[in-house]
Image (tube, coloured by chain):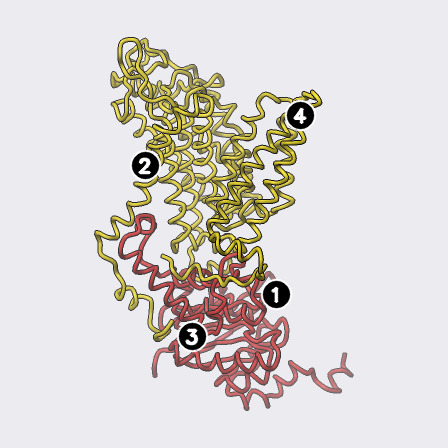
Chain colours: A yellow, B red
């Protein structure tokens, strides 16, 4: 903290510049780690989970892509967009157009093999097409984001929400007007324009190859590989997105977005070009929503149809962001995972699914009105003692729920599905509470936990200087 | 004669039929300390909003070190070197104190979005320089020990200091302070006063301030402009302005005959 403060910024930049090779390695390192994790999930974890939970893992990955991309606009820039499913739909249909009609036209999908991929294997020709379609879907969605964002980002709050809502509905209605998908035998001779007009309409885009499936390297009777490394692709994209989000948040650009969210007038007065910042955020979010849509379009067990990607889907994504904490990357990831898991776990208790889901939301919003983590990241939470204690209490409450309701179910024989649902929630709370406790305890250091438990230090004892070591 | 750091010529702005500012002119030389005073509703903050591009003037020109600012967006004006603080404090409340300053210091960063996402050497060097400079600024303003706290959790006086630090982080040529000591006690005012005086030479910046505290304005400002109902009623050195009958009238009203007439 020494030196002459009057020295200008530009003069200082020269004094510290890391070696280009070191910087490149450091820059690539987290991406490599992300890819390794994705590969481990695909090869080690997914086979153990079985098809149902492996599919859930895929769902979680796609939900993370959608929620985290919306977090750039809703969380970082503070612009309330509720048309995210619209961008998802644009990206999804653009990608499906490429993979379905593309693979037929380029001869990569044998005519007649309706919806069954012939080319498989890791990074086979089909996979390359799929990856290209993801990027293409993202780019088309980003263009749509630019077209919507440029005129409408001068609007604020409710008005912007209405415009984005309208955009989502327009896309949905447009897609509904298209005709049925051209069958593979005829598709080869159809022009691209005709193909673009035949997106399945209200029935949905049937027959898209299921690249995003949890079962890789499957072999059919003739010994040909049919499966796809869907989990790897999904989580590779998740890690790239999360790294991009983190780096954005830590950079001047991200702080400019946060400044717009906090106080637009002050941000403008400090030299932040607020309209440009907002458009950049909007386009970036639309791009990743498009990629998420492309993943969704090729997911196994999913038919890309306009009904599913309507207003309700947009709201689901918004809830993930609000619940996780607007602006918190880790919070939104957590919320996306939990909110994808909850309804799936309670599928058997369908009649109580929505009330329980709603109740869980209400409780969280009462206990933590700014979402799980507010604007902070998991590792920034202070005071950690309190969060450790909170996690333990959560785990204890979960344990009690689980035990009492389990006893009611087994001991008393009161096998109402509501009871089962609540004991499931109890079990989930127990697991999450324990996980949280371990996490915060690790962050605190065990020794400090033991010492802290005895001495009970004041909350403010820890002087926060986290930012000094960055970047 | 040197080019004035900030020059405004015949600025005028009307909201409908109400003339908020009429024929306002000022010339602030480099490193000067000018004051703008006037009763409540005289149009002082409107003048600041005109200078910083929040409002567009109906007439008149604004020059910053010879560069014409008319029609530019507030962000472009800030980047040109005109920074301000706000009467009703406008911090980035949820962000940390350091991040508030870093945001302002970062607007001149050359590395674009791609460099930031890829973390190139230029980006790393710039971010490092931004952090260092921001901490130095907080040090000068005496709030470095609070760098990690949320801005909205700061006590009032420190929030004002943070606003000044943030404005200085944009590397301004001219600093506009809107009531920097409003709501402060005598001790705080005294500290703020010496701080304001020290900023000029330290950061090579001209200061133009609005203030209701007459003692402070008369003591530290070399030149004072008095506004009333949008009209400049007096301008000059402190002693002269203080004696001006129009100024006394604006602040205290006119005795006897005026009351009899009404």
**Marks 4 and 1, Cα distance to the nearest angstrom?**
66 Å
Query: Does residue A204 appear anywhere in the picture?
Result: yes
Residue B84's x, y, as percent?
48, 68
* Towards the viewer: A148 or B200: B200
**Marks 1 and 2, Cα distance to the nearest angstrom?**
67 Å
- Chain letter of disc 4? A
Give the residue drawn at x 63%, y 33%: A358
Residue B169's x, y, as percent?
41, 67
Query: Does residue B72 appear anywhere in the picture?
Result: no
| Badge number at residue A418 | 4
Q: Which part of the image, by quadrant, shows the N terminus of chain B?
A: bottom left
Q: Are marks 3 and 1 on the same chain?
A: yes
**Mark 3, residues whose alpha carbon is within 10 Å: few (<14), some, or many (≥20)?**
many
Q: Is there a contact, CB below 8 Å, between mark 3 and mark 1?
A: no
Q: Is residue A351 left or right of residue A286?
A: right
**Marks 2 and 4, Cα distance to the nearest angstrom?**
40 Å
Residue A89 higher or lower than A17, as above or below: above
Q: Is residue A100 left or right of residue B196?
A: left
Q: Which part of the image, by quadrant, shows the C terminus of chain B?
A: bottom right
Give the residue pinned by disc 3. Answer: B7
Q: Are marks 2 and 4 on the same chain?
A: yes
Give the residue pinned by disc 1. Answer: B18
Of marks 1 and 2, the one in the foreground: 2
Instruction: Give the secondary structure at mark 2.
Output: helix
Q: Are marks 1 and 2 on the same chain?
A: no
Residue B48 higher or lower than A95, as above or below: below
| Badge number at residue A36 | 2
Rendering quarter of residue B212: bottom right
- Chain letter of disc 1? B
């Amino acid at each position: 903290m020494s030196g002459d403060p009057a020295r200008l910024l530009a003069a200082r930049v020269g004094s510290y510049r890391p070696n280009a090779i070191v910087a490149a390695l450091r820059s690539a390192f987290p991406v490599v780690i992300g890819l390794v994790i994705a590969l481990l999930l695909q090869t080690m974890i997914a086979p153990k989970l079985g098809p149902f939970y492996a599919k859930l893992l895929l769902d979680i990955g796609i939900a993370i892509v959608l929620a985290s991309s919306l977090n750039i606009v809703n969380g970082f820039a503070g612009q309330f967009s509720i048309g995210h499913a619209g961008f998802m739909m644009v990206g999804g249909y653009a990608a499906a157009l490429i993979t379905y009609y593309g693979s037929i036209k380029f001869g990569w999908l044998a005519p007649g093999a309706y919806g069954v991929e012939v080319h498989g294997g890791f990074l086979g020709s089909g996979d390359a097409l799929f990856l290209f379609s993801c990027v293409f879907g993202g780019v088309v969605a980003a263009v749509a984001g630019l077209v919507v964002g440029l005129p409408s980002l001068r609007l604020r709050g409710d008005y912007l929400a209405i415009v984005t809502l309208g955009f989502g509905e327009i896309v949905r209605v447009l897609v509904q007007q298209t005709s049925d998908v051209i069958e593979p035998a005829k598709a080869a001779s159809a022009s691209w324009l005709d193909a673009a007009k035949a997106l399945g309409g209200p029935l949905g885009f049937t027959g898209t190859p299921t690249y995003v499936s949890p079962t890789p390297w499957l072999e059919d009777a003739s010994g040909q590989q049919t499966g796809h490394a869907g989990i790897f692709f999904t989580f590779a994209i998740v890690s790239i997105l999360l790294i991009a989000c983190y780096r954005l948040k830590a950079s001047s650009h991200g702080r400019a977005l946060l400044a717009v969210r906090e106080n637009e007038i002050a941000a403008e007065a400090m030299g932040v070009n607020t309209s440009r910042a907002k458009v950049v955020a909007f386009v970036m979010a639309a791009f990743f929503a498009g990629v998420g849509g492309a993943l969704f379009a090729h997911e196994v067990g999913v038919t890309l149809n306009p009904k599913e990607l309507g207003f309700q889907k947009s709201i689901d994504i918004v809830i993930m962001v609000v619940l996780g904490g607007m602006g918190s990357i880790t919070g939104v990831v957590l919320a996306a995972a939990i909110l994808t898991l909850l309804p799936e776990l309670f599928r058997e208790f369908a009649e109580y699914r929505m009330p329980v889901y709603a109740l869980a939301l209400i409780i969280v919003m009462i206990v933590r009105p700014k979402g799980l983590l507010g604007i902070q990241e998991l590792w920034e939470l202070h005071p950690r003692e309190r969060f450790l204690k909170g996690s333990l209490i959560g785990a204890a409450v979960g344990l009690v729920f689980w035990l009492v309701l389990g006893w009611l179910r087994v001991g008393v024989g009161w096998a109402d599905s509501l009871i089962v649902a609540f004991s499931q929630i109890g079990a989930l709370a127990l697991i999450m509470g324990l996980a949280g406790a371990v996490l915060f305890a690790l962050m605190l250091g065990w020794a400090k936990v033991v010492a802290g438990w005895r001495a009970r230090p004041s909350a403010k004892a820890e002087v926060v200087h986290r930012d000094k070591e960055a970047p | 004669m040197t080019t004035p750091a900030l020059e405004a010529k015949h600025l005028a702005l009307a909201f409908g039929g109400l003339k908020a500012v009429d024929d306002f002119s000022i010339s602030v030389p480099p490193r000067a300390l000018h004051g703008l005073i006037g009763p409540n509703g005289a149009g002082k903050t409107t003048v600041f909003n005109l200078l910083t591009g929040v409002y567009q003037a109906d007439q008149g020109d604004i020059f910053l070190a010879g560069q014409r600012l008319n029609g530019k967006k507030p962000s472009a004006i800030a980047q040109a070197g005109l920074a301000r603080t706000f009467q009703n404090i406008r911090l980035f409340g949820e962000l940390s104190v350091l991040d508030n300053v870093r945001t302002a210091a970062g607007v001149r960063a050359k590395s674009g979005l791609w460099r930031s996402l890829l973390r190139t050497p230029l980006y790393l060097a710039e971010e490092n320089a931004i952090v260092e400079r921001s901490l130095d600024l907080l040090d000068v303003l005496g709030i470095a020990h609070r760098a990690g706290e949320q801005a909205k959790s700061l006590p009032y006086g420190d929030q004002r200091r943070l606003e000044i630090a943030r404005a200085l982080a944009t590397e301004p040529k001219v600093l506009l302070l809107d009531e920097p000591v409003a709501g402060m006690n005598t001790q705080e005012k005294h500290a703020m006063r010496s701080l304001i005086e020290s900023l000029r030479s330290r950061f090579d910046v001209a200061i133009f301030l609005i203030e209701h505290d007459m003692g402070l304005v008369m003591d530290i400002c070399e030149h004072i402009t008095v506004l009333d109902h949008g009209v400049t009623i007096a301008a000059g050195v402190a002693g002269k302005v203080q004696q001006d009958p129009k100024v006394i009238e604006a602040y205290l009203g006119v005795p006897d005959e005026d009351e009899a007439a009404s």
